[in-house]
Amino acid sequence: MFEEFVAINSRGAGAIRDWKKRTGRKVVAVMPEYFPPEVITALGACPVRFRGAQVPISKADTYLQSFSCTTTRTILEQALDGEMDEVDAFVFTSMCDNQQNLAEVFKRLFPGRPVIIFMIPFTSQVQSRRERLKEQLHAAIAGLEQVTGSTFTQGAFEQAKALHGKHGALVDRLYEVRRRNPGAVTAHGFYSALKAGSHLPVEEHTDMLGPLVSRLEKEPVRPAEHRIIIAGITPEPLELTKLFDELGLYIVDDDMTSGARLYSKGVLAGTDAAGIDAFVFGGSPCSTLYDPSKDRGAYLVGKARASRAGVVLWQIKFCEPEAFERPDLTARLKQGGVPVMSFEVELPMAGFEGIRTRLQAFKEIM
Amino acid sequence: MTRFRVSETMKELMASYYLEAKNAAYNNTPVAWITSGGPVEFLYAMGVIPVYPENYAPMCAITRVSKDLIEVSEAAGYSPDLCSYAKTDIGADMTQGGPIMGLPKPDMLIVGTNICHTVVKWFDVHARKYNVPLFVIDMPYLHDDMTEDAIGYVVRQFGAFKGFLSAVLKRPFNEDRFRETLFLAAQVSDLWEKVLSMGKKKPSPLNSFDTFIHLAPIVTLRGTQRAVDYYTQFYAELEELVAQGFGSVPDEGIRLLWDNLPIWYKIKYLSEFFAKHRAAFVVSTYTNSWAAIQGNINTDHALEELARAYLSPYINRGFRYRIDYLVRLIEEFSLDGVVFHSDRSCKPYSIGQYIVKEEVTKRTGKPGLIIEADMNDPRAFSDAQFETRAEAFLEGFER
């Protein structure tokens, strides 16, 4: 059911390379989240994403210390390996200190390709945050107009919103069908399907998701006793999701920056201050955003209870935003009667035996 | 490290500052915990005592208790990979440990993001524990040049910060005292810059291991007459020492720059090691950061100037600026090389150092050395590894 998505992912940026060859249009990479892709689509370019990958690190070690997170290091490795050769420009967001400095690394190492910065505000002052976001968005649009040679128009923006809205609606249905029938959706299949969207034009990914969702919606409900919500930045290395399938741990939902957190934001409604603020700070809480109006602990307890699920905190080594929240989040989940465990991964890792043992033990206590 | 006459004065000054802070509750004086790059002038204007976890953490390292406190945090679930300042501070707070047995309880928490995003997460831990208001002022990283947009953004937040303080303290913001504080803060930053510029002298009467220690008053007491008096005295002593031809490193032979935070628990060892090799650190990007916080307050646009100043620290700048700045310091301070402390705990300072080092060497011909360590966690430092690398680096100057 998920083979074609797995095939796309196995080719890395191959699909986007084909698309670019076919259309001659520009490719813009969002590094990695919370810049509205609708803007890039409206300018006739294809938004792609690089979130790190299960690749061995060698070349990147020349430029980055081993205490940079492996998301950062594998992204650079991919770039140095030519995986991003089709990318005409990068839009970096300031989700964390690693990403912020990685933008500078890209500017020095790939001087021929523009690096556009979209700074995410960390402030207590909501009005200042909104105005800042608007300034940042408009500056980014101006930069992207130069890259694409196109002018941002309301008409093109409306069309892009419709395309991304249709895509988002399918992703929402995919999440919903998994919530309703987690036994019918493998973890590896689900996240392979989502990941394929990182390297495909939105129309093509939408066309692939449509039949998948329709088919899954018709699947009979299967038993899924041990239900899990995974929480973290991104479910990488993707191979690790297979372990959940093997062990009969059914991922019923997630709290991932590249997953439900991102898709909970919906589509950018407008390029004014309220529109961009609603896009970046709307939706579910995220460890990489400063928004004191949101309580991730309460959110996750509620989500876990509603799904009758335990929570697995999927920590990528050296990820500060997630690691800072772990002690409090763990305590809050336990207080809320939600089983919780955490493990730490590095993206290039291939052996998961230690995690297997811990997940098995977790299954037993659930 | 050099024993200056003012060293005793500084000890007394800092002791009296911490005594005042520890007794704040008895004196009904509000206390704010604030980050090292936070705009302290607003607090002094409102009679709030600023307390710096980033000052207390190194105190714990120098007194050799940081490792134990870090381990307390880790036992509570904080990852070994998190910032060692944060873990020292959280451990000290949990145990009321360290040289002054914990910091006084905060009435509010103030964060400036011009040093990292880590501080937002770190202070949020305290905000949850103490259930006190947290005010975060975004001072965005300048990837390229200073922009009016960025300045305007910080100014708007400064305005809101005044309102926040007024609401928490239930009294109007004291504009008159704020102006006085700005005046004193500008004076003290100017004095600090003059102190640091003494490193240009040959031989240099002070070195970075000295300035790491004498940094404490400008961090904690910026905006007070006490700090102005202290650095006035320090500068006068340095002028005397220059007149006498005094060098802080005897027979100074190699002039170096220190990049990044100090390795606090090894300051004495490093000072002696480099002195033995006649190598003097005459300038450091870290201590220079507080000289950058120097707004021209004699204008009608004091907040704009202050915003510009708080956006300026080296760690808040992109690599192009960093490379140009190091090249300029190499010239101005007649340097022979650069030592980069690759600090496991401080990602925004450290990530990119390999590139900066290569490009600076390419432009100036001056070599660089990377030391892999951590500012506050002694577990990340190996004497043998350091000595092998540093000796090879220093031998290069003797050929």
Image (tube, coloured by chain):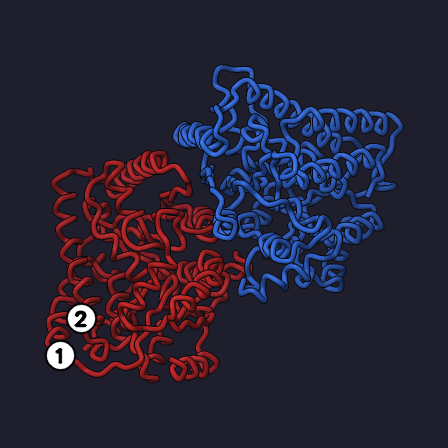
Residue A211 lies, with reference to residue A248, above or below; the image says: above
User: Helix, strand, or loop for circle 1?
Assistant: loop
Query: Mark 2 to mark 1: distance in Å?
Result: 9 Å
Pointer 2 and pointer 1: residues touching (CB < 8 Å)? yes
Labels 2 and 1 share a subunit: yes
Q: Which chain is red?
A: A
Q: Is residue B274 left or right of residue B338?
A: right
Return the x and y of residue A47 as percentages of the image width and height: 26, 53
Q: Nearer the viewer, residue A203 or A299?
A: A299
Q: Mark 2 Cα within 10 Å, few/some/many (few <14, many 20+)?
A: many
**Pointer 2 chain:** A
Residue at the image position 43 percent from the left and 32 percent from the top: B157
**Residue identified by numbered label 1:** A219
Q: Quadrant of the N terminus of chain B?
A: top right
Q: Is residue A122 left or right of residue A151?
A: right
Residue B256 lies, with reference to residue B192, above or below; the image says: below
Question: How many marks do you count on the picture?
Answer: 2
**Which mark, residue A177?**
2
Q: Nearer the viewer, residue B132 or A317?
A: B132
Residue B266 lies, with reference to residue A275, above or below; the image says: below
User: Helix, strand, or loop for circle 2?
Assistant: helix
